[in-house]
């Protein structure tokens, strides 16, 4: 537990947005060498409005999308992938080898606009438009490699992908003492600092991962964050208590430990992770907040070990519902395919009882059902969880439900789990 007087300059949680760099790796390098061909594809674009281009040191293109104007740089660069890069999707062996052996790809560098998720979606659309025949996508801001099949489906959709694609959480461990360092990548391009947790452990880092995930989703949605030592609400713990956190600059956080060689200390930040990043701690009470006394997140491990109730933004809940409905055909085709053993769950947003309704809430409880039958507008399903706010529903009871209340779904096939985001796995 730490408590300190204000003897230093505090950092801002909202920063100037950093450039987002993403690269499409083509099947044929000649596909991106001709500027004339690139411009012709942009002129024929249907996923955004192309407004023109000029050539300076590199090609500069102007795009209009969802009421915002963008100017961005397009360049052919060498493919530079490090061992830390994560392959986020299932890739064919052929495509994986092609990415690893590629000499060059087409990179777009752009500043995000007002809504980070829309800007990210636009960047996907532009890369797909210019390089439709790609083997994969490299997001340098999150150090991830994405599937070409996923990119195609995401780019052609009217609905943005999950905000989880805009950032990533890297987990670094120390085998000697069992410590774990978690930190985000990708939030700086949204106008927020990055976040991290120091001195986690191999037994508890998954709980701490969910904490960072909740914070990162909010940072993407808000396009910034609260300032250092200010408080913010994360969610509710198993016992129902609120989880209130804060952040402090990484260098100050590292100085609080007697061991100056901890994982995530200065020795691990020679090349990166030195600016615009803060370590997450907790305020356990209002008194702690007033005294600026912060506590390591491990103090509540027992209270979040079963399930931290993360609070999704209204925008994210709506997005999940829209994309689940947009891609419902994949679910229907799989469930109605009698040749393969598949079962599926659907999450439905059902109106809560009158006593729990509130003008400030959406007044719906989101509940998972196992689907028995599905047609164009309805499902017959069995409830799989006990509702909190709807008294007349019981676990294992059978119901008929309207698909208009759908908020999410999962398919369980013999080989894998499919969600609306991973339907690319069902493509050829």
Image (cartoon, rainbow, N blue to C red):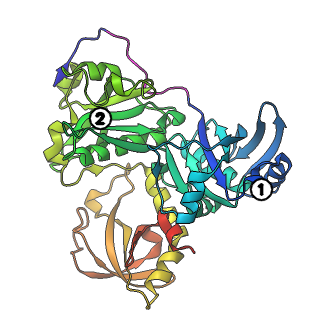
Seen in the picture, residue 217 relative to 341 is either above or below; the reply is above
**Drawn side of residue 116 relative to residue 64, left or right:** left
- Residue 15 belongs to the span the image colors magenta: yes
Using the rendered view, name the quadrant where residue 44 is placed.
bottom right
Residue 2 visible in the snapshot: yes
User: How far across and how far down the image is residue 241, in percent?
Assistant: 18, 43
Assign the N terminus to one quadrant of the image.
top left
User: How far across and how far down the image is residue 168, in percent?
Assistant: 43, 45
| Residue indicated by mark 1 | 45
Seen in the picture, residue 5 relative to 144 is either above or below; the reply is above
Q: Nearer the viewer, residue 170 or 382?
A: 170
State the mark number for residue 197.
2
Q: Which residues are magenta?
A: 8-16
Q: Main secondary structure of the magenta part?
A: loop
- Rounded to the nearest angstrom, the CA distance separating label 2 from label 1 is 43 Å
**Drawn side of residue 91 relative to residue 37, left or right:** left
């Amino acid at each position: 537990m730490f408590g300190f007087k204000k003897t230093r300059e505090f950092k801002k949680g909202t920063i100037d947005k950093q450039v987002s760099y993403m690269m499409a790796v083509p099947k044929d390098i000649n596909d991106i060498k001709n500027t004339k061909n690139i411009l012709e594809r942009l002129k024929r674009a249907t996923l955004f409005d192309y407004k023109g281009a000029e050539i300076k040191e590199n090609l500069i293109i102007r795009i209009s999308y969802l009421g915002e104007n963008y100017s961005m740089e397009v360049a052919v660069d060498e493919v530079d992938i490090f061992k830390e890069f994560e392959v986020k999707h299932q890739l064919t062996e052929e495509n994986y080898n092609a990415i690893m052996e590629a000499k060059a790809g087409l990179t777009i560098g752009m500043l995000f606009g007002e809504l980070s998720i829309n800007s990210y979606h636009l960047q996907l659309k532009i890369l797909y438009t210019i390089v439709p025949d790609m083997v994969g996508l490299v997001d340098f801001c999150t150090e991830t490699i994405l599937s070409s099949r996923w990119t195609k489906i995401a780019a052609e959709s009217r609905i943005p992908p999950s905000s989880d694609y805009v950032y990533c959480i890297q987990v670094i461990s120390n085998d000697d003492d069992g410590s774990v360092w978690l930190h985000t990548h990708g939030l700086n391009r949204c106008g927020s600092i990055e976040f991290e947790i120091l001195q986690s452990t191999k037994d508890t880092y998954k709980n701490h991962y969910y904490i960072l995930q909740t914070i990162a989703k909010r940072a993407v949605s808000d396009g910034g964050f609260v300032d250092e030592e200010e408080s913010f609400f994360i969610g509710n713990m198993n016992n129902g208590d609120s989880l209130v956190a804060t952040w402090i600059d990484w260098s100050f956080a590292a100085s609080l430990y007697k061991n100056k060689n901890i994982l995530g200390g200065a020795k691990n930040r020679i090349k990166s992770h030195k600016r615009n990043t803060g370590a997450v701690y907790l305020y356990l009470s209002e008194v702690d907040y007033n005294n600026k006394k912060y506590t390591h997140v491990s103090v509540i491990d027992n209270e979040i070990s079963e399930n931290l109730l993360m609070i999704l933004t209204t925008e994210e809940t709506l997005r999940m519902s829209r994309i689940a409905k947009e891609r419902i055909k994949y679910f229907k085709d799989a469930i109605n395919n009698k040749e393969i053993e598949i079962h599926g769950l659907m999450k439905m947003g059902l109106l809560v009882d009158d006593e729990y309704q509130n003008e400030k809430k959406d007044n719906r409880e989101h509940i998972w059902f196992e689907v028995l039958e599905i047609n164009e507008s309805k499902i017959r399903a069995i409830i799989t969880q006990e509702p909190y706010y709807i008294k007349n529903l019981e676990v294992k009871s059978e119901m008929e439900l309207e698909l208009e209340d759908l908020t999410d779904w999962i398919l369980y096939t013999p080989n894998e789990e499919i969600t609306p985001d991973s339907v690319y796995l069902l493509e050829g």
